[in-house]
Amino acid sequence: MLSERSSLFRSMVNGKRMLIVLDNVSDTGMVRPLLPASSGCFALITSRSTLAGLVAREGAARVTLDVLDPTDAVELLARVIGTVRVQAEPEAAVRVAELCGHLPLALRVVAEHAVDRSGLPLADLVAELEEEQHRLDSLASSGDELSDVRAAFSWSYQAISTELQCAFRLLGLHPGRTFGTESATALLGNSDQRATKRILNELSSTHLLQKVSTNRYRLHDLLRSYAKELLEEGVSQKDRSKSVRRTLSWYLLASDAGRKAILPYSHEVPLVPQNQVVVPRFADAKSAMAWFEVEHMNILAALDQAMDTGQYDIAWKLPVVVDGFFELHSSWKEWEDIHRIGAEAARVIGDRLGEASNVFALGDADWRSGRRESAMANYESVISYAEETEDPWLIGFSLRGLGLIHLEMGDLDRARDHFHSSREVFRANGVRRGEGMALLSLGEHARLIGDFDAAVSMGSDAVQVFIEIDDAWSEAWGALPLAKSLAELSRGREAAELLVRASRTFDGFKDRRSLAMSSDLLGDVHHQLGETATAADHWLYAAEIYESLGEDTLGEESRTKARRFE
């Protein structure tokens, strides 16, 4: 929940002296959960809105920043085009600043082109800008945020090549605030990323685009609005839809490539044709996780755009392929939200597989949140849908999910029956990772009834399956219940070795919650071995991770164990 995440944030900054910058806030609802409660923290908020609610309720001090005053605007112009030219035509320089609305962005755009035309008198520059302003006056309206800069942007836009104009217009359709060369290549319909990079760099040199890193760019909000305005005037809806489709297809296909590198045997669904889209290749899970972290916000924005533009097939598939990333990062709120959107999109187009795929994840979310009845209802509905679409992966994991809930409720016989049914489905259809997960669950059942030898045997078989299919994360996950069973048989050294390797794997995947679980278990094992100082270190490390994730109850449990040996 948002309130829980807000509380976590405030607890993390409590007692610290921090400056928190909240940039480009659109409304008070967006910023209020991020305001620190600690007196040692200061929040600096930038916005094009007045945010009156913050002044009235939170006592914020509003500092209204106007555009540059005429003197500073002319000084900025002089810095770019040279003092000599400005001093030679001071009145013309003042008029250029006026025609740019005294806005730094517009001034830089115009000045950059004045630099390229060193022989052009500033008076002639003024004439060109005035002519463009007069032509565009009919477009301006009360409250039009582009009214003061449209002429400057238009003049700069008219000065670039047709190729760059087309690219600039289309970039207004990109769902993200920043974007990389690869997604821009898909948006522009190019087949060569080098050509795209050249275009983006040329737009950056004219200040119509900002380069933020080697292969990453940002389109200023005002320029994005201007690009969209040009799209409305000069690009057909058909061509706009094609560009959006290419971009969203790229995010879907790239995310699926990342999924295969991270969790190669997670749920696979039919995608979309690749066509002109160049899909990235990931050498390993680490590089895929790094890509997901960079594109995290753009993936969410792409999902919203898919819904807004009626690309419902992509809207249900994208949550499925990025499911593992959000789960491994413990992004629980986003994880649940994307699957609710995915289920809604699938229902709109009547896609039963899409609905089942997203409802299954909602079952997981319900179970994790303690909503057992809702979780069971979701799993049961998924089984019904999956039988229609003949998807054994969904059937098997839904049966296992039901078994886990019954295990948690103490109904061990029903849990065992569901685990056996799950394993049969997986074995009959060659879903090897599923078979391994079912074996893990059967091993956990055996441990709970005291049959530790059977628990170790089944746990070992499960881990061997994961090794054979080269699924590193699942191998590490399987080590956790196996280590518990080994410890029950006083084989603590073996358990510790397994958990150390698992911890390294979880750390590599940046799966901090699983890392906390393995660290907590390591504490238990070392305590059993009589190594209390080492045990306390592992428990404290687990507590720190849990608390950083907002898992305060689990964190306190680990911390309490460590306190016994202070």
Image (cartoon, grey):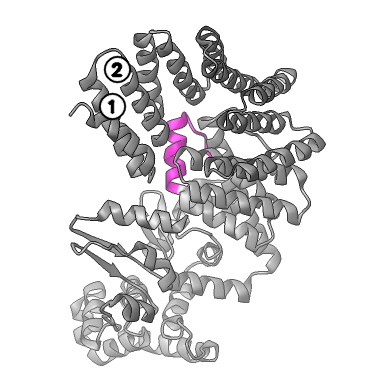
Around disc 1, counting alpha carbons within 10 Å, would you say few (fewer than 14), some (14 to 19), or many (20 or more)? many
Quarter that holds the C terminus: top left
55 left or right of 417 in image = left
Residue beneath the point at 60% across and 46% down:
319
Q: Secondary structure at mark 2?
A: helix
Q: Which residue is mark 2?
A: 526
Badge count: 2
Residue 494 locus on image (x, y percent) = 38, 9
Residue 209 locus on image (x, y percent) = 41, 64
In this rendered view, identify the residue nearer to me: 328 or 173. Answer: 328
* Tag shown at residue 552: none
Tell me if label 2 and label 1 are in contact, CB under 8 Å: yes
In this rendered view, identify the residue nearer to me: 45 or 246. Answer: 45
| Residue 395 found in image quarter | top right
Residue 542 locus on image (x, y percent) = 32, 32
Q: Pick whichever of labels 2 and 1 is earlier in the sequence.
A: 2
Residue beneath the point at 29% across and 18% down:
527
Around disc 2, counting alpha carbons within 10 Å, would you say few (fewer than 14), some (14 to 19), or many (20 or more)? many
Which amino acid lies under the numbered mark 2 shown in the image of this protein?
Answer: His
| Residue 265 found in image quarter | top right
| Residue 390 found in image quarter | top right
318 left or right of 325 in image = right
Whole-angstrom CA distance, mark 2 to mark 1, is 9 Å
Q: Relative to 471, is 81 above or below?
A: below
Q: Which residues are magenta?
A: 276-294
Q: Which residue is mark 1?
A: 538
Which amino acid lies under the numbered mark 1 shown in the image of this protein?
Answer: His
Residue 456 locus on image (x, y percent) = 50, 10
Is residue 380 visible to us here? yes
Q: Secondary structure at mark 1?
A: helix
Q: Relative to 195, is 320 above or below?
A: above
452 left or right of 94 in image = right
